[in-house]
Image: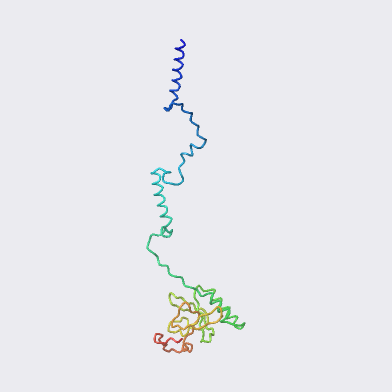
Amino acid sequence: MDKLRSSSDQDGMMCRYTDTDSGLGRATPPRRAPSPGMGSMRHLPSPSGPGSLPPGLMTKRRVFDDGSSDISSTPSSMMDYSGPRLYKQPTTKSNRGIMLNAVEYCVFPGTVNKEAKRKVLDEIARSESKHFLILFRDAGCQFRALYSYCPDREEVSKLYGTGPKQVFDKMFDKFFKYNSGGKCFSQVHTKHLTVTIDAFTIHDSLWQGKKVNLPNKKNMPLVI
């Protein structure tokens, strides 16, 4: 009986070792439970690197990025307008401020010309023209009239004073430009009127009221 009991005890011990054996002849120790949060962090995708996202998602993101970069690099004006390029005509520079300065400090000196100064300043304020011209009697720069000048139509029309209602190219004699710093007019040696001119004179024969043949400017030498 003792032999049978000892034999059965040995068989039972062998069965227990066999159930827990890992194949190396010893019992497998119990596994440690994972720390909280470690399991979820192990499966989080890396913020960078091609292996962090599935191939399909990577392809979609690449296509989306390429499209957005093309749109951002395109000027908004080109996206809004797809027609032919339009020509923008340059705006005409105005000499209104220069003319106000000239009338105030140079053209009408002293209190004697106070009333004439006021009328000329009122005409400039009332007019919608961007460019004004002063007609002088001669090179002495005595005021005779105020004109408006439209460069697009090449029209010089009188607003106030004594002189022709309109002045044409053949009627011009001398041209002047106003110096705001020196508060004076200086002669400009040119044959034709431009937007840089602030004052002018006409030929003496036009003041006499006689119809005469005006000289052709093409054959006139330019005196400097």
Q: Quadrant of residue 152?
A: bottom left
Q: Residue at x 40, y 67 (%)?
A: 87
- What colour scheme has been applied to the protein in the rendered image? rainbow
Q: As drawn, is 123 to the left or to the right of 75?
A: right
The outermost residue toward the left is: 84
- The residue at 43%/46% (across/down) is 49
Q: Nearer the viewer, residue 142 or 25?
A: 25
Position in image of residue 197 (x %, y %): 48, 79
Q: Name above or below for residue 76 compared with residue 210.
A: above
Q: Nearer the viewer, residue 81 or 40?
A: 40
**Which residue is farthest right?**
111
Question: In this rendering, would 218 be left or right of 141?
Answer: left
Work out whether residue 53 or residue 36 is closer to the camera in this orientation and state it: 36
Across and down, in percent, residue 148 comes to: 49, 77
- Residue 41 x/y as whole percent: 49, 39
Is residue 215 shown above or below 77? below
The structure residue drawn at horizontal position 41% and vertical position 44%, both measured from the top left corner, is 51
Residue 129 location in percent, x, y? 49, 74
